[in-house]
Image (cartoon, helix red, strand yellow):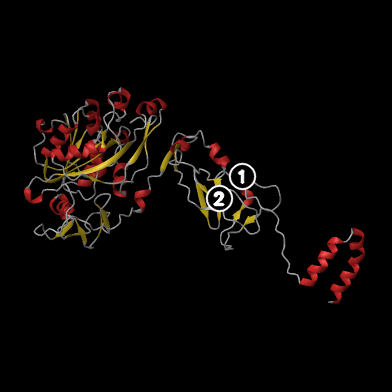
Amino acid sequence: MNQKQISIGPTVSPHPLIRDAIARVPKAIRDRFYGCGVPLPPGIDGLRVLDLGCGSGRDCYVAARLVGPTGEVVGVDMTDEQLRVAREFVPEYAATLGYSPHLRFVKGYIEFLAQLPELYPGTIDLCISNNAVNLSPNKELVLRSVFEMLREGGEFQFSDIYADRRLPNHVRTHPVLMGECLGGALYTEDFKRLCQRVGFVDARQVSAPAPVRIEAPELRDLVGATQFYSITFRLFKFARPAAVLEPTREDYGQVAVYRGTIEGQRARTRLDSQWAFEAQRPVLVDGNTAVILGESWMRRHFEVRGDRSQHFGGFAAQPPPVQLEPWETDHELEYEIGNGADPVVRRRGIQPLPTPYFLTGLRAQADARSGSASRRASPTRDSPPHTMSLPMPRASAPMREQPFPRLSSFSISQSNVRAENAGLRSSNGPPARAMPADGDPRFVLPVARLAPPYALRTSPAVPRIAVSPAQQQQQAQQAQQSPQQQQQARPQQQQQLTGS
C-alpha cells in the first residue's frame, strides 16, 4: 500500500510478544511488508498455520516464532520474486530463533489451494491473510478453498479493506485503486452474507474498524463519499451438526471459563470486539460463543460448562465490558524524518479534552506544523473544531465561546499545562492567573502564556463596601454639592472618621 496515497488510521496495537517477534524478523522482509493489520492470535503454539498471499513472508516469520519448534507454517504466493526473498532469509531467522522452524513457502493461487501438492484438505488449524483476499477476482472461491483446507474447529483470521457501500464499476476497475487494495474492497454486509453462503456462519470482528485515509486528492474525488476501513475478522469452520453455528445468538445457559494458559495474557484474553474473559471467572455465553471456545483449536484454553439440551430463547445477557490493555493503545506513534538518516519517532496528537487547561496549545504551534508530516498524521486533522465555554474567573467580564485549538502534542506537568515550542511571553509584568470558578487553587492557568484570541479578557474588579443608611444619605448630599463645597467638607469628614 502506497503510504503517500493511502494511510490507515489507528488500530489496536499487537501484543508485545508479537511486536517483539516482528522486530526479530530480518529487515529485508519487514521492508517488503504491505499488510493492513496483524491477523495473528496468541496461544497458537504447536498449530499448523497457512498464510494466503504471504508476499515476502513477514507474518509467516512471526507465526513461525509463535507456533514454536513443534508447529508448522506454510506461505502461499503467486509471485516468484516475493517467494525468493521469503526463502532467502529462513536460515538467518533460524539462527535468531535458536532452532530450525518448520517454515515453507509455496507458489500457487489462493483460489485453488487443494491443487497444491504440499497441502491436504482438512489439515490446517489456522489460516491467516493480510490484505490479500481483496486482490482476488473471485473472493467466494477463496473462502471455499480455505473452508476445505481447515480442519473441524479451524479458524480463518485475516485483515482486509472493506467499504461502507457497494463500489461502482469505475472504482472497482480503476488500476490505481486496484493496486492500492481499494478497488477490490467488499461492502461489509455483502462480505458477511458471502461467509454464510460458504459455511462461515458467525463472522467475528476482532476490534474496531480502522479508517483508511486517502491522501491523494484525485483519488478522493474518484471514490466520492465512500468510506474504507481496515477490519480483522475471525471465521470458524464447524461442519458437524452437533457443533454447527446458528445465524442468531441463542441462550442455552452455558458458561465459559478461561484457564489463563495463553502466554502474555494469563490474566485476561479477548475473543473479539464483544467478548473478553478474565482467568478463572465464569461468564455466561451464547451458544455460538460456547461452540467456538469449546470446539475449536481454542478449547485447550477454555472450559465450557453445559450443552444445548435446553433452550432459553434469544441471548439477552450483556457480556462483560471489553477493556483495552495499556499496550493495545500504543499505536499512536508516527515517524518523522529528522536531521540525520534515522527517522525520529514521535507520539501522535491526542484528541483535545473539554477542559480549559489545554488552551496552552497555541495557534502558533498549529500554524508552524501545518505543512509537516506530523500534521497530516494527526487523527484530529479532519475532525470538527471543538467549542467550549471558559470558566468565569472572579470579577471578570463575560467571555464568549472560543474554538478549541487543534493540538499536535502537549504535556501536563502538575498544575500547569505546557505547550511544546511555545515561545510567546507577556511583556506586561508578571503573568496574571485565572482562578477556577469554584476557587480551587490547585490548578492555575498562566494567562500571559496564551495567544490571542485565547487570552482571557478581564476587567478590574470594583470593591464592594457595606455602608449604613446615614452614610448613603450623606453620599447622596455630596453628589449634589459643587466640587468646591466637597473640597471644603473633606477635612470635616476626615475629623469625624478619626474621632469615630
Disc 1 to disc 2, C-alpha distance:
13 Å
Location of mark 1 (residue): 451
Question: Is any atom of residue 258 visible in this view?
Answer: no
Looking at marks 1 and 2 on the same chain, the residue that comes earlier in the sequence is marked by: 2
In this view, 74 is above or below 438: above
Location of mark 2 (residue): 418
Q: 79 or 109, which lies in front?
A: 109
Amino acid, disc 1: Ala
Question: Is any atom of residue 420 visible in this view?
Answer: yes
In the image, 50: left or right of 206? left
Residue 245: percent from the left, percent from the top? 14, 48
Task: Say the numbered circle drawn on residue 184.
Answer: none
Q: 462 or 359, which lies in front?
A: 462
In this view, 488 is above or below 293: below
The picture quadrant where one finds residue 422 is: top right
The residue located at (30%, 54%) in the rendering is 322
Few, some or many C-alpha atoms within 10 Å of disc 2 (few <14, some 14-19, many ≥20)? many
Amino acid, disc 2: Arg
